[in-house]
């Protein structure tokens, strides 16, 4: 399984998510999306990313995020999959990809570029999948051969955008499901941020209701 991080990158929160998946028998790769800029974390991250410090952290990360172009995503995805499937503990067969926020769009691009390897895609509060630019992720849906699940917070998308998203998936013939989690805000799956609702516990961290 390929687990793509949110904008804050690899940190204990994502490592714990990987461990939870590994307990179910998966071999999980959590790549450092900013590896060209150094080992993770590439910027200093507090143990808890509160709202008061979030803007400053995002400002530090924004140049790295902007440098992570679709072309770079595809180059890196190819390397991730080759590395993952070459590991001796990984059995032959397809790969699933799960992504959080920014990572949600990355999983769509990865699955579209590697339809012969991708079995399932899950994105939780994915970064915009429907935009006005020519390389918007929703234009890649016809290339998907995977099942797709989306987990959204309230307000992640307008009703109009949600309609366009589902219509694009339907027209492409993609088998898909989506859930909107009531009472949540963007980023609710991350327990190291203020967006996390403690009552949801471990299931909420994974994006599972």
Image: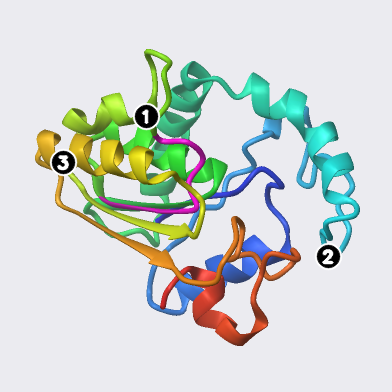
| Magenta span of residues | 120-129
Task: Work out whether 171 lies above or below 27.
Answer: above
Residue 57, x across and y down, in percent: 84, 43
Structural distance between the alpha carbons of marks 3 and 1: 15 Å
Residue 106 locus on image (x, y percent): 46, 37
Whether pointer 2 and pointer 3 mark residues with C-beta atoms closer than 8 Å, the reply is: no
Secondary structure, mark 3, is loop
Q: Which residue is mark 2?
A: 48
Q: 116 and 7: which one is in front?
A: 7
| Residue found at the far front of this picture | 159
Would residue 117 be visible to someone looking at this image? Answer: yes
Q: Nearer the viewer, mark 3 or mark 1?
A: 1
Q: Are marks 2 and 1 in contact (CB under 8 Å)?
A: no
- Badge 3: how crowded within 10 Å, few (<14), some, or many (20+)? many
**Dot 2: what SS?**
loop
Label 1 SS:
helix
The answer to whether 141 is drawn above or below residue 19 in the figure is above
Q: Which of the 4 quarters of the picture holds residue 209?
A: bottom left
Residue 137 is labelled as 1
Give the quarter of the image for residue 74: top left
Separation of residues labelled 2 and 1 (CA atoms): 31 Å
Question: At x 39% / y 40%, what residue is drawn?
Answer: 81
Q: Which mark is residue 145?
A: 3
53 over 183 or under it: above or below? above
Figure quadrant of residue 122? bottom left
Q: Work out whether residue 111 or residue 49 is closer to the camera in this orientation and state it.
A: 49
Which sits earlier in the primary sequence, circle 2 or circle 1? Answer: 2
Q: Spatial distance from mark 2 to mark 3, Cα to Cα?
A: 38 Å
Dot placed on the residue nearer the N-terminal end, 2 or 3: 2
Horizontal arrangement in the rendering, residue 162 relative to residue 198 (left or right): left
- Going 47% across and 36% down the picture, which residue do you hit? 128
């Amino acid at each position: 399984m390929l687990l793509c991080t949110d904008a804050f990158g690899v940190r204990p929160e994502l490592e714990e998510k990987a461990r939870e998946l590994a307990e179910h028998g998966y071999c999980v790769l959590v790549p450092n999306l900013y590896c060209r800029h150094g080992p993770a974390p590439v910027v200093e991250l507090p143990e808890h990313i509160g709202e008061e410090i979030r803007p400053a952290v995002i400002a530090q990360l924004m140049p790295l995020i902007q440098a992570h172009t679709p072309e770079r995503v595809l180059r890196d995805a190819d390397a991730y999959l080759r590395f993952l499937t070459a590991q001796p503990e990984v059995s032959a067969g397809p790969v699933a990809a799960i992504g959080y926020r920014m990572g949600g769009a990355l999983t769509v691009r990865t699955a579209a570029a590697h339809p012969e390897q991708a079995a399932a895609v899950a994105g939780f509060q994915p970064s915009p999948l429907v935009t006005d630019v020519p390389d918007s992720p929703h234009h890649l849906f016809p290339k998907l051969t995977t099942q797709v699940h989306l987990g959204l917070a309230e307000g992640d998308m307008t009703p109009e955008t949600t309609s366009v998203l589902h219509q694009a998936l339907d027209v492409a013939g993609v088998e898909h499901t989506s859930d909107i989690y009531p009472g949540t805000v963007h980023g609710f799956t991350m327990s190291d941020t203020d967006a996390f609702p403690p009552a949801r516990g471990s299931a909420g961290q994974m994006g599972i209701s």
